[in-house]
Amino acid sequence: MAADVRLMKTAAELALADAFAAVKSTLPGDAAVAAQRTAAFETFASVGLPHRRVESWRYTDLRALLREAPPLASAAGPEALARSLAACPMLAGMEARRIYVVNGAFVSDISDLANLEPGVSISSLATALGAADPLVAHLGQTVASSDAALALNTAFMGDGVVIALAEGATLSRPLHLVFVTTEATATAAYTRSLLVMGKGASAQVIESHEGPAGAAYQVNTALEVVVGEGASLERVKITAEGNDALHISTLLARVADGAKLANANFTLGGAIIRNQLLVQLAGEGIDASLSGVSLLAGKQHSDTLLAVEHIAPNCQSREQFRTVVDDTARDIFQGRISVRQSAQKTDARMMSRALLLSDTAESDNKPELEIFADDVQCGHGCTTGSLDQQLKFYMMSRGIPEKEAEALLIQAFVGEVIDAIGHEGVRAALTDATRNWLIERK
Amino acid sequence: MTPLLEIRDLHAEIAGGRKIINGMNLTINPGEVHAIMGPNGAGKSTLSYVLSGKPGYEITGGEVIFRGVNLQELSPDERAAQGLFLCFQYPLEIPGVSNMAFLHTAANSQRKKRGEPELTSPELVRKVRELGKQLGIDTDMLKRPVNVGFSGGEKKRNETLQMMLLEPYLSILDEADSGLDIDALKVVSNGVNAMRSPERSMLVITHYQRLLDYIVPDVVHVFAAGRIVHTGGKELALELEATGYAQYQNEAA
């Protein structure tokens, strides 16, 4: 009977339960946090790992994909930390304040924490939880979600970065959160970060994730963001995990009146990658941009879940996603824009496009609009196709070799998203990274 | 004199089996301008695609020798490097690829293949700007994506710019006048005429005589039912304007 089947726990689910029981007393935070963890784990336990019958996970059957629950990652040694400093080479030349989270732990020794801008604080989540920092009250309060993967993150969150910008505070250079896994064995890391921006604050935040090839490690990371009134945030997340890694990421963002949020995801590494973007436009006159580029090859599987909620009137949101899929890789995009009855004069446009480079590549595209207001402009579109053969011939007839013509067309395809990124250095780095991906493709 | 292009008993079809070129012969010597005229549907554009190597157009018999090489063995980009240029009837738009980057890649890809030194960015920019000036193409158009948002006339000027930059031995102009007003026609023709030299040849495909007032051919061919049915001097174009193609279509049938 179906009901009995649901009660059956998989080996991974049982291992997660054992792991939680074993470590919960050692995880940071006071009694309230401990209760939050327990409640989150119960939420997870009641539904188990997401599977195909859970609509938001329909194309990524985590129950089938996640066979084991590896041990939590342990602190990196000096040699591994030294190596971590060289992480994210694509941004090596960029002036930024770099904060390192290695094997799931904030490493203040190698992080650049000196001379913080006025009104800016950066600390480790473990420290903030241990000290009952008032900021941690935001955890779990930004955007409500019952997602099972996020619940696991809440239950196990060990460390992360807590950033606060007071009213009017501005970062003078981008903040680069460098997440690295160094161990070559299968480990799991649960990181939770928090970014709270006061009225009129302004920041550029880059988040990069990487780890060794050939290691079946798991990363479950989440970032909660509060963008205050009139504040401005540009965030770019680069996922460049090792080729056997499982990466789950959740962004929970609540945006206030007149604020600006631009979030771009750039995905190129990892075996299974899931990016969840849950965004609430809670104030009036918000300008939001959610975008992404994925470059997938081999057997990679990348799944993006986007849920943008327009709650207040007069907000604009733009959702632009581009994916290039080669070999037997698979891309999934599920995007939903919800417009509540209160959100009159909403202007929202979502476009997701996939470019398939082989006959065996796959793209699943599911755009949705859910509109309860009657005076709005909303649109969505999606396309899946191969390279334009006519254009390719036109370029070749000018002497451009086939592979180069393809590369130019692919770069132009993803360039539409990359060129909209505000920070010039990041834009150039992502353009180069795309070019390198195309060179390796040959 | 060694011919620049020699087409011998060429048969070609579009993938799917429709035969379009049917036993065609043509010899173009260096420095000559040949016009091919013919009614709609005679296979003129197909000829240009077969020569430039468009996928889906297959040579089923005969051969095409260009500068001593059998074209069938070359990919479209190799044909271009060998000195063949097709000026498209309807130039394509390439969103996201800037005109300048496109020209740079095209010019240097050809040079690389021929073992010639590549152009540096400043060299190329200077050259392109000079040509642009001659053709009335401003720098803004050079920065924009290839042909995106260009008018019909601007696209043809852009094709002419590409041709002048790449300096091909044989330019195939496929209905170069379609969509052009008189002023644009003059600009494009002047560009084409500036290219004329003892070693460069042109194959001008058109069904109106008008273009040949500006680009005066040495030889005029009538093309019908997939082959050349009549050949004459430049005065043949004027005759055709008066009599039409009907008599030759009967001849072909």
Image: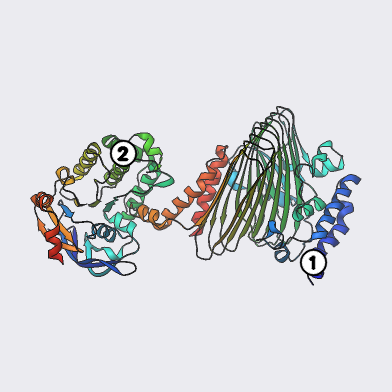
The number of callouts visible is: 2
Left/right placement of residue B102 relative to residue A427 reads left
Residue at numbered disc 1: A6
Residue at numbered disc 2: B127
Pointer 1: residues within 10 angstroms few (<14), some, or many (20+)? few
Residue sticking out furthest to the front: A374
Which of the 4 quarters of the picture holds residue B120?
Answer: top left
Residue A304 in percent (x, y) is at 64, 53
Establish if A343 lies above or below A436: above
Left/right placement of residue B200 relative to residue A92 reads left
Mark 2 belongs to chain = B
Pointer 2: residues within 10 angstroms few (<14), some, or many (20+)? some
Establish if A297 lies above or below A369: below
Residue A274 in percent (x, y) is at 67, 55
User: Helix or strand or loop: what does disc 1 sit on?
Assistant: helix
User: Helix or strand or loop: what does disc 2 sit on?
Assistant: helix
Numbered tag placed on residue B180 in the rendering: none
